[in-house]
Amino acid sequence: MTVSRRKDTGQWVTDFYHNGERIRKSLKFVRTKKEAEAAEAVIMNQVFQQVYGFEPKSNKLFEDFVVESFLPYSEANKKSFSSDVYICTLLVSYFRGKTVRQFTPPVIEEFKQWFLAKPIVYGTEDEKKERPRSLATVNNHLRVLSKILSLAVDADLIDSNPCFRVRKFKPNNRRLRVLSDEEEAGLLATLEGNDLIRCIVIVALNTGLRRGEIFSLKWSDVDFQRGRLVIRKTKASKERFVPINATVRELLQSLPRLLSDYVFPSPKTIGRLTDIKKGFRKAVDLAGIENLHFHDLRHTFATRLADAGTDAYTLMEIMGHADLKTTMIYVHASGDAGRRAVEKLDAKMVFSHEVVTKEKTVDADLP
């Protein structure tokens, strides 16, 4: 090793030659000879990598990589771009100032625990409420973070993705909140005067469409002649057809066709609507409805179809489920289907009893 200590300042320096070139550097913050030798070894390794074409990995800031690399990738390749933007806002706020090389499993685990413990605040300014954050939401943020770091691996900024060593939460039992008739009436009454959200809620309750599918619905997707909607941007990336009833038909025919191609355009941009969460949550609170999310309107639709006796395969096709097991949740949740089956046994037993009783009566009259 070629480290020495300056007599005038007491600072340690490294001074060595490589391929005839003198390399001399001051070693700031080094206090002992052992530390100086360790620092010199790092410098020598960096020089070796540069000379032989092994450039050190860039120490890119996390927020810069998100803006420059991940978000353009998401916009070009993912249907969840708007959601990714929202998630990245929180991730950048939390990890601001960190480089992608500073991400480790403990750092990510700390974020996971912090985000889970951070409650969701909602309600009016006068009366704010809190509710716990779901495990699924935390997992979604971890998935986006993992994709960001996977792209960093592809860009040769880091060697491996540390998210792979962080366990995601096991999701809660599947949520199946169904809106009652009284709750539906209260919600629609509260939405009087807010035509946009009211119409979207009615469509959701009568078609089972996901929120994003409703936002993406265009007039060219409405087929009044065949009485159906063509859903092109689906979760499974597979086009499907959803029948419309008289309620939805009359509602759509009553809507003004503005300059937008979208059935429910954004009031501000006339383009695709991106969110109604704040207005919907306000209406739910004013109606005094507990524990209701927008996606529960889809659950309500599916449960009501199952209650009406719709077979599982038809329900699966309308809902756009990729797996029949998902559809069967609504069939199993519906008590009416089981009751109808049992009632058939009742009818059969009554008929059999009448036949047997009649035969016994005839036998008794015989001489």
Image: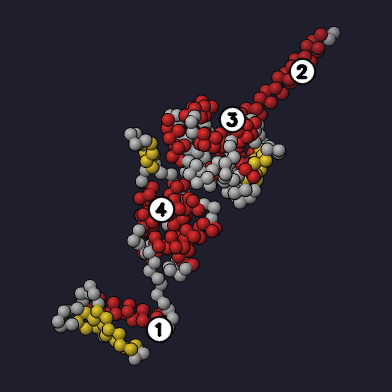
Spatial CA span between label 4 and label 2: 73 Å
Residue kind at label 4, given as amino acid type:
Thr
- Compared to 333, does 268 lie above or below? below
Q: Does residue 197 appear anywhere in the picture?
A: yes
Q: Which of marks 1 and 2 is in front?
A: 1
The image quarter in which residue 9 lies: bottom left
Side of 288 relative to 8 (left or right): right
Residue kind at label 2, given as amino acid type:
Val
Residue extending furthest toward the front:
259
Residue placed under numbered mark 4 in the picture: 89
Query: Which residue is at 23% across, 75% downward?
Result: 28
Q: Do the residues labelled 3 and 2 touch (CB within 8 Å)?
A: no
Query: Which residue is at 79% across, 10% downward?
Result: 364
Q: Do the residues labelled 4 and 2 touch (CB within 8 Å)?
A: no
Q: How busy is the neighbourhood of tag 1: few (under 14 within 10 Å), some, or many (20 plus)?
A: few
Residue kind at label 1, given as amino acid type:
Val
Residue placed under numbered mark 1 in the picture: 51
Spatial CA span between label 3 and label 2: 31 Å
Q: How busy is the neighbourhood of tag 4: few (under 14 within 10 Å), some, or many (20 plus)?
A: few
Side of 326 relative to 224 (left or right): left
First in sequence: mark 1 vs mark 4: 1
Q: How busy is the neighbourhood of tag 3: few (under 14 within 10 Å), some, or many (20 plus)?
A: few
Q: Which of marks 1 and 3 is in front?
A: 1
- Compared to 217, does 142 lie above or below? below
Q: Which of marks 3 and 4 is in front?
A: 4
Residue 355 circle label:
2
Residue kind at label 3, given as amino acid type:
Gly
Q: Does residue 213 appear anywhere in the picture?
A: no
Residue extending furthest toward the right:
367
Q: How busy is the neighbourhood of tag 2: few (under 14 within 10 Å), some, or many (20 plus)?
A: few
First in sequence: mark 3 vs mark 2: 3
